[in-house]
Amino acid sequence: MSELRELLPGATALRPGGAGENADGGGAFEVGPPSYANLQNERTPPERPPSVLDAVFTKLTLAYGKRFREAYAGLPLDAVRGDWQHELAGVSPHAVAYALQHLPPDYPPTVMAFKALCREAPAPAMRATIGNDRKRTVMPERFKSEMARLRTQMSSDILSGARSLRDKERNGVHLTQAQRAFWRMALRHSED
């Protein structure tokens, strides 16, 4: 019996004389997730806000009814909730919401299957700033003038890239066949 306790430090003894009593009269053990109070070398996971875990259990109960409740029949509710809370620690509410919207239709998921569903959640989309009531930042005058200069320069000489490639080739720089064909086609009808 003491060997079993050493192997299973998180196991708690059941009452003697119960259905799980051994033939030699020894008490049976209930094996489940270890109590965090009994573990000295492990850190307690951060607690998930009760509202998220409550929402998960409510949705699973509503979606699967007695199939979900019977999956954990005979287990203490605190242990089941503790295991779910431990496994879902660090999972974003966005991922939990995604998993709740993509539950399997035929069977209630285990905590590991639910966690896998959470991992499939796409990254949340960034909100567009257009239409928000946030104040627009004022562009510094220097930035405005530089942008105007660049627009003018780009619109006034749209063939500058082709001319640059032509000049490089004339100066002995090796160009790819595509670069040579590009500058020749672009400058075919130009005056340069």
Image (cartoon, rainbow, N blue to C red):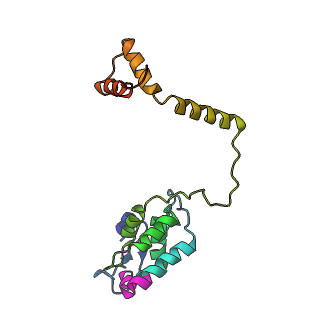
The answer to whether residue 2 of the structure is visible from this angle is no
Where does residue 151 sit, x and y in percent of width and height?
A: 57, 35
Of residue 127 and residue 66, the one placed in the foreground of this image is: 127
Q: Position of residue 116 (x, y in %)?
A: 37, 64
| Image quarter in which the N terminus is found | bottom left
Viewport quadrant of the C terminus: top left
State the image quarter where residue 70 is shown: bottom left
The magenta segment is 61-71
**Which residue is found at the position 60% from the left and 57% from the top?**
130
User: Which quadrant holds residue 100?
Assistant: bottom left
Placement of 1 over or under 67, stated as above or below: above
Say above or below: 9 vs 69: above
Q: Please indicate, yes or no, whether residue 120 appears anywhere in the rendered image.
A: yes
In this view, the residue in front, 159 or 16, is 159
Q: Farthest residue toward the top?
A: 171
Would you say 39 lies left or right of 147 here? left
Mostly what secondary structure, the magenta segment? helix
- Give whichever of 169, 110 is nearer the camera: 169
Magenta stretch holds residue 76 = no
Residue 75 rendering spot, x and y as whole percentages: 41, 80
Q: Is residue 62 magenta?
A: yes
| Left or right position of 141 against 38 | right
